[in-house]
Image (cartoon, rainbow, N blue to C red):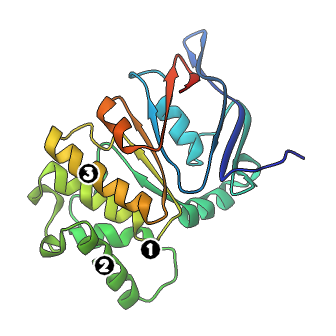
Amino acid sequence: MRQIDHLIQIHDLGKQYLSGDIRVDAIDGMNLSIDDGDFIAVMGQSGSGKSTLLSILGGLNHPSRGEVYVDSLDLYALTAEQRADFRSEYLGFIFQSFQLVPYLTVLENVTLPMAVTGRKQKIKKQMALEVIERVGLIEKAGRLPDQLSGGEQERVAIARAIVNKPPIILADEPTGNLDTHTANEIMLLLKSLNEEGHTIIVVTHNPDVETYATRCVNVRDGKLLLN
């Protein structure tokens, strides 16, 4: 049995796709360890494999080979239902395109991840309002996503990601659609969450993100280049 000494540990990770008759290595032999409390920036150009890596770490994309351990759990030895439970308990996702439900208010969007928790509605609302206030949008809790700026929508996405208090936050290009000032505000918010104890993994091609991270790794052609 492999000894697991880190919060997240991947070994000889590989992911292949078929493009016509050609087999493409999106991930090729990655090894990486991430500790509790780390703020990791995964840097790389489009098509380098960094978003594929994030989806595998999030239990969303079964690797072609290798192992992924999170808190000593062999992630892809779990059943699909067990992985869904794992995601609900351990992970908060922040997507580049926000993925907010357009016909739900800010409050309703942030409440969504608690749908399967079994908490009473009053508790869900209270928890949602707390994180909405945490990201500075309490006065806009009743608005729809299209009534918000891009930066505000990103803050809603962050509130939704942290409402269940997951230990790990995975962010895919969280500043990709934002201007420089707003991007810096979002990174400062993620940094403060990291300082409060969340382990954060950010995938990005924005070199400015590196200044907020405790560690940076580079991905090129599906391979990990450690700094």
Q: Nearer the observer, disc 3 or disc 1? A: 3
Which residue position holds label 3?
186
| Residue 67: quadrant of the picture | top right
Q: Earlier in the sequence, mark 3 or mark 1?
A: 1
**In the image, what residue occupies the spot 32% across and 68% down?**
110
Drawn side of residue 211 relative to residue 50, left or right: left
Q: Is residue 206 visible?
A: no
Determine whether, in the image, residue 87 is placed left or right of residue 99: right
Out of 40 and 124, give the one closest to the viewer: 40
CA separation in Å, label 3 and label 2: 18 Å
Q: Are marks 3 and 1 in contact (CB under 8 Å)?
A: no
The residue sitting at the left extreme is 147
The residue indicated by pointer 1 is 114
The amino acid beneath tag 2 is Glu
- On the question of residue 54 being in view, the answer is yes
Q: Residue furthest top?
A: 21
Q: Amino acid at mark 3?
A: Ile
Is tag 3's residue or tag 2's residue first in the polypeptide sequence? Answer: 2
